């Protein structure tokens, strides 16, 4: 079924998604040299995934809430698959290609891993079906060991399923109850975490699934509620101020220490519950001030999903190199910069040479309209 393509993008939100995605890449590059959560540079970069979930909930509501009288649940799922699945598949293929280059002291099983098993894991990964720990071929218990960030796309799909089947029908009052309960669950997770943070969600284990659901439910449905109840106001220089606030939040040094783990957990939960909705609200009310700002927002938005889902195989290689050769941060940093910009180049190439052409072809085949586009934005996450 064809739907009118009359809704404009929130250009500032596109740009902010790109800012967060670039911070994720930098976070993972620095993570390779960290000795613990306490000394990680760009310490709260992991919260970008929660920001992505909130953005996704807001824009899903904007794109689809008023279309259900013209669109079936099946149509919705087709649109989301066309938007998200091509890059999922490419990300897993890139992960498989890079796998044997990641052989190192921290992943010794790579050295003897049979090719058939890597191919099997890749094929299952292309479906986003989570793998049990028994199928781990790396040693980090990831549900997608070839491309760790696939875990957040798994939860993004679950959020979309919950929205289409149930939550889209919720009144504002019932949705508010869901958001409040989800917020309390997130606070409980943050304050009781053994690490004093909400990092996790990437393994098919009860504890990790608890983290994944807690991290997905509040921000996604809070974003949906924010769209339904907020009245957008005009904000000048929104991209600059929202980007600055987002960078400060994600780069904030660890709050407290080993003796005060609860303090960092409290910071995490308050940022997700209050600061991220504020940033999205302000960003939704802004527009690029000039052509340069527009181009930056568009470029950042265009590469945000591709860079998130393709960068981690490069980070695996970089992390293995550091671990095997015991490279200190000051010596590893130039290589880390190369990895960072290589990830941008890989993302842009993937977008132009693969993602856009494949989605155009799929839209033509699935919707019988080569010009059809969807106003929804793709959500991305951090490992």
Image (cartoon, rainbow, N blue to C red):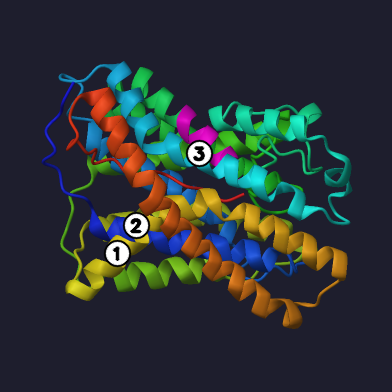
Q: Nearer the viewer, residue 136 or 383?
A: 136
**7 on left or right of 55:** left
Q: Secondary structure at mark 3?
A: helix
Residue occupying the far bottom of the picture: 330
**Crowd tier of the residue under label 1, counting other residues whose Cα lies within 10 Å: few below 14, some 14–19, many 20 or above:** many
Q: Nearer the viewer, residue 249 or 310?
A: 310
Residue stretch in magenta: 149-158
Dot 1 corresponds to which residue? 297
Dot 3 corresponds to which residue? 88
The residue depicted at 35 percent of the width and 24 percent of the height is: 77
Q: Quadrant of the N terminus?
A: top left
* Observer able to see residue 287: yes
Mark 2 or 3, nearer chain start: 3
Which of the labelled discs sits on residue 301, or is there none? 2
**130 on left or right of 361:** right
The residue depicted at 30 percent of the width and 69 percent of the height is: 296
Question: Residue 156: x percent and y percent?
Answer: 47, 35
Q: Are marks 2 and 1 in contact (CB under 8 Å)?
A: yes
Question: Residue 350: x percent and y percent?
Answer: 44, 52
**Crowd tier of the residue under label 2, counting other residues whose Cα lies within 10 Å: few below 14, some 14–19, many 20 or above:** many
The residue depicted at 48 percent of the width and 64 percent of the height is: 344
319 over 191 or under it: above or below = below
The residue depicted at 82 percent of the width and 53 percent of the height is: 103
120 over 223 or under it: above or below = above
Q: How many marks?
A: 3
Q: Secondary structure at mark 2?
A: helix
**177 on left or right of 210:** left
Q: Nearer the viewer, mark 1 or mark 3?
A: 3
Mark 1 or 3, nearer chain start: 3
């Amino acid at each position: 079924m064809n739907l009118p393509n009359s809704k404009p993008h929130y250009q500032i939100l596109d740009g902010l998604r790109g800012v967060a995605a670039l911070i994720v890449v930098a976070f993972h590059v620095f993570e390779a040299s960290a000795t613990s959560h306490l000394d990680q540079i760009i310490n709260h970069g992991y919260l970008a995934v929660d920001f992505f979930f909130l953005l996704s909930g807001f824009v899903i509501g904007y794109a689809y809430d008023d279309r259900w009288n013209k669109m079936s649940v099946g149509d919705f799922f087709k649109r989301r698959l066309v938007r998200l699945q091509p890059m999922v598949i490419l990300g897993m293929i890139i992960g498989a290609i890079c796998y044997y280059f990641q052989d190192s002291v921290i992943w010794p099983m790579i050295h003897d891993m049979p090719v058939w098993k890597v191919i099997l894991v890749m094929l299952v990964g292309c479906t986003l079906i989570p793998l049990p720990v028994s199928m781990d071929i790396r040693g980090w218990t990831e549900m997608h060991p070839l491309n760790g960030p696939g875990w957040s796309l798994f939860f993004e799909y679950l959020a979309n399923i919950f929205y289409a089947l149930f939550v889209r029908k919720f009144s504002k009052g019932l949705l508010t109850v869901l958001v409040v309960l989800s917020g309390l669950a997130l606070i409980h997770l943050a304050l009781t975490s053994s690490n004093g943070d909400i990092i996790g969600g990437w393994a098919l284990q009860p504890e990790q699934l608890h983290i994944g659901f807690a991290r997905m439910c509040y921000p996604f449905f809070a974003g949906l509620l924010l769209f339904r109840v907020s009245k957008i106001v005009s904000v000048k220089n929104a991209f600059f101020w929202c980007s600055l606030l987002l960078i400060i939040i994600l780069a904030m040094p660890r709050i407290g220490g080993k003796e005060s783990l609860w303090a960092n957990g409290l910071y995490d939960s308050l940022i997700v519950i209050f600061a991220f909705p504020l940033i999205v609200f302000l960003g939704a009310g802004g527009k690029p001030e000039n052509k340069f700002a527009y181009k930056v927002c568009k470029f950042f938005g265009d590469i945000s999903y591709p860079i998130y889902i393709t960068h981690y195989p490069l980070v695996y290689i970089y992390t293995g190199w550091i671990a095997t050769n015991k490279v200190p941060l000051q010596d590893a940093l130039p290589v880390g910069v190369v990895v960072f910009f290589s990830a941008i180049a890989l993302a842009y190439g993937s977008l132009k040479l693969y993602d856009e052409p494949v989605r155009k072809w799929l839209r033509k085949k699935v919707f019988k309209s080569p010009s059809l586009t969807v106003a929804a934005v793709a959500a991305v996450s951090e490992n």
